[in-house]
Image (tube, helix red, strand yellow):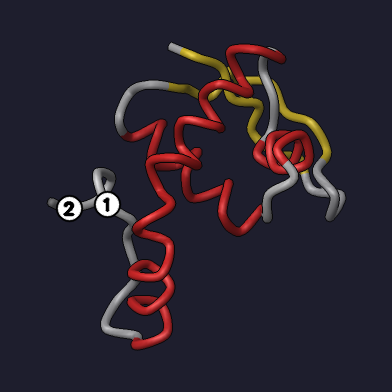
């Protein structure tokens, strides 16, 4: 299987591949949690989802990208400021 069905990594970097391999056993559970959060609490940014689920943004943001590629969530067109002060995509269910 390949991305977005499994976690991706950029290039041949050993650390990127190791991170993808390390998260692999948890990916389905985190994706389900992200989807449930959007279903329960409505449109949210990845930062908002991470905060609600008490997960690292580094675990949630890639799952949002994967769910988008899988056609399960989509960009609402709305933007909200995230924790770093940058405007972020607000995700909605498709």
Q: Quadrant of residue 22?
A: bottom left
The residue shown at (42%, 84%) is 15
Dot 2 lies on which element?
loop
Q: Is residue 44 left or right of residue 6?
A: right
C-beta proximity under 8 Å, tags 1 and 2: yes
Identify which residue, 29 or 65, lies in the foreground: 29
Counting labels gives: 2
Q: Is residue 59 left or right of residue 13?
A: right
Answer above or below: position of 41 versus 45.
above
Residue 80 x %, y %: 79, 31
Task: List the single residue furthest toward the left.
Answer: 1
Marks 1 and 2, Cα distance to the nearest angstrom?
5 Å
The residue shown at (45%, 22%) is 73
Residue 2 shows which numbered tag? Answer: 2
Identify which residue, 12 or 7, lies in the foreground: 7
The residue shown at (43%, 73%) is 19
Residue 89 x %, y %: 64, 33
The residue shown at (24%, 51%) is 3
Answer above or below: position of 86 versus 39.
below
Residue 69 x %, y %: 33, 35
Q: Quadrant of residue 94?
A: top left
Identify which residue, 21 or 79, lies in the foreground: 21
Residue 61 x %, y %: 57, 48
Residue 50 shows which numbered tag? Answer: none
**Which residue, given by chain and number where applicable, does mark 1 sit on?**
6
Task: List the single residue furthest toward the bottom.
Answer: 14
Answer above or below: position of 70 versus 46.
above
Answer above or below: position of 12 versus 6.
below
Are there few (<14), some (14-19), or many (20+) residues within 10 Å of tag 1?
Answer: some
């Amino acid at each position: 299987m390949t991305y977005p069905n499994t976690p991706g990594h950029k290039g041949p970097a050993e650390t990127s591949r190791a991170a993808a391999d390390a998260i692999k056993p948890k990916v389905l559970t985190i994706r389900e949690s992200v989807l449930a959060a959007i279903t329960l609490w409505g449109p949210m940014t990845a930062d908002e989802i991470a905060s609600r689920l008490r997960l690292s943004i580094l675990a949630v943001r890639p799952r949002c990208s994967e769910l988008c590629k899988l056609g399960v969530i989509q960009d609402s067109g709305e933007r909200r400021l995230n924790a770093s002060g940058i405007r972020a995509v607000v995700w909605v269910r498709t």
